[in-house]
C-alpha cells in the first residue's frame, strides 16, 4: 500500500452526538505481538491528528402536492403511498435507514397537501434527502397526476 498523505475521513455514527474530541498518537511497533490491553487494528500508518464530533442537525423532506383538477382521491392516495414507499427504499439504498412519514396531520393549503418525511437515521440525511427530492421531482414528471414541490429543511 502506498502512502499518499493523509487519508480522507470515513466512518458513520448513528444517533445524536455531543461535541467531543478523539486524539490519535502514533506508536512504534515493538516487534512482539500484543497479548493484553486494548487493541485497535489500523491498516495504515497513523499520524498525529484529531477528529471533532459535531452534533447532527436533523432535517426533513417536505413534499407539497398539488393534485390535478378532477383527480380521483383514492387513486391519488395510492400513488402517493407508492411514491413514499419508493422514497423509503431509495433512502435505504443510499445507506440510510429509510424514511418515516411525520405522524402529524398533513398541512393542507388551497388545493395542496404537504407531507413531511423524516429520516430514520439523521447521520448524512441532508445529502440523502436531497437525492430523494430529485427522485420525487422526476417521478412526478412521469405522469403521476400531481405537481410536487420538494424542500429539504431543518426539522422543527
Image: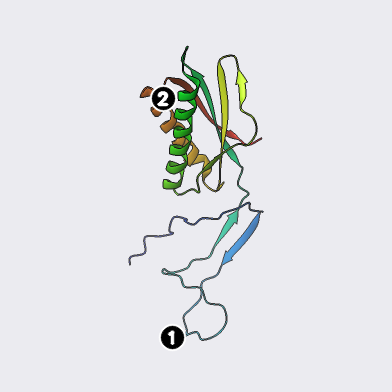
| Residue carrying label 2 | 140
- What residue appears at the point 44 percent right and 28 percent down from the top-left corner? 79
SS at mark 2 in the image: helix
Residue 31: where, in percent of width, then height? 43, 86
SS at mark 1 in the image: loop
Q: How is the image coloured?
A: rainbow
Position of residue 1 relative to residue 111, above or below, is: below
- What residue appears at the point 47 percent right and 18 percent down from the top-left corner? 72
Which one is nearer the viewer's eye here, 87 or 85?
85
* Sooner in the amino-acid sequence: mark 1 or mark 2: 1
| Residue carrying label 1 | 31
Position of residue 12 relative to residue 140, above or below, is: below
Quadrant hosting residue 62: top right
Position of residue 97 relative to residue 41, above or below, is: above
Quarter holding the N terminus is: bottom left
Which one is nearer the viewer's eye here, 35 or 3?
35
Quadrant hosting residue 43: bottom left
Q: How many marks?
A: 2
Q: Residues within 10 Å of mark 2 (few under 14, many from 20)?
A: some
- What residue appears at the point 46 percent right and 16 percent down from the top-left corner? 71
Which one is nearer the viewer's eye here, 123 or 72?
72
Residue 94: where, in percent of width, then height? 43, 46
Nearer the camera: disc 1 or disc 2: 2
Which one is nearer the viewer's eye here, 54 or 152?
152
Residue 40: where, in percent of width, then height? 51, 73
- What residue appears at the point 63 percent right and 51 percent down from the top-left corner? 16
Task: Tell which residue pokes out farthest to the front in this image.
Answer: 74
Quadrant hosting residue 156: top right
Task: Tell which residue pokes out farthest to the left in this image.
Answer: 1
Amino acid at each position: 500500500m502506498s502512502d499518499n498523505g493523509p487519508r480522507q475521513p470515513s466512518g458513520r455514527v448513528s444517533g445524536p452526538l455531543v461535541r467531543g474530541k478523539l486524539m490519535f498518537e502514533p506508536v512504534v511497533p515493538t516487534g512482539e505481538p500484543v497479548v493484553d490491553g486494548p487493541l485497535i487494528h489500523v491498516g495504515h500508518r497513523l499520524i498525529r491528528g484529531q477528529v471533532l464530533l459535531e452534533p447532527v442537525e436533523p432535517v426533513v423532506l417536505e413534499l407539497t402536492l398539488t393534485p390535478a383538477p378532477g383527480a380521483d382521491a383514492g387513486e391519488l392516495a395510492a400513488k402517493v403511498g407508492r411514491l413514499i414507499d419508493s422514497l423509503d427504499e431509495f433512502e435505504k439504498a443510499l445507506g440510510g435507514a429509510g424514511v418515516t412519514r411525520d405522524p402529524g396531520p398533513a398541512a393542507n393549503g388551497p388545493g395542496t397537501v404537504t407531507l413531511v418525511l423524516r429520516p430514520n437515521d439523521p447521520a448524512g440525511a441532508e445529502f440523502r434527502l436531497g437525492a430523494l427530492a430529485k427522485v420525487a421531482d422526476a417521478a412526478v414528471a412521469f405522469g403521476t397526476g400531481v405537481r410536487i414541490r420538494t424542500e429539504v429543511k431543518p426539522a422543527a
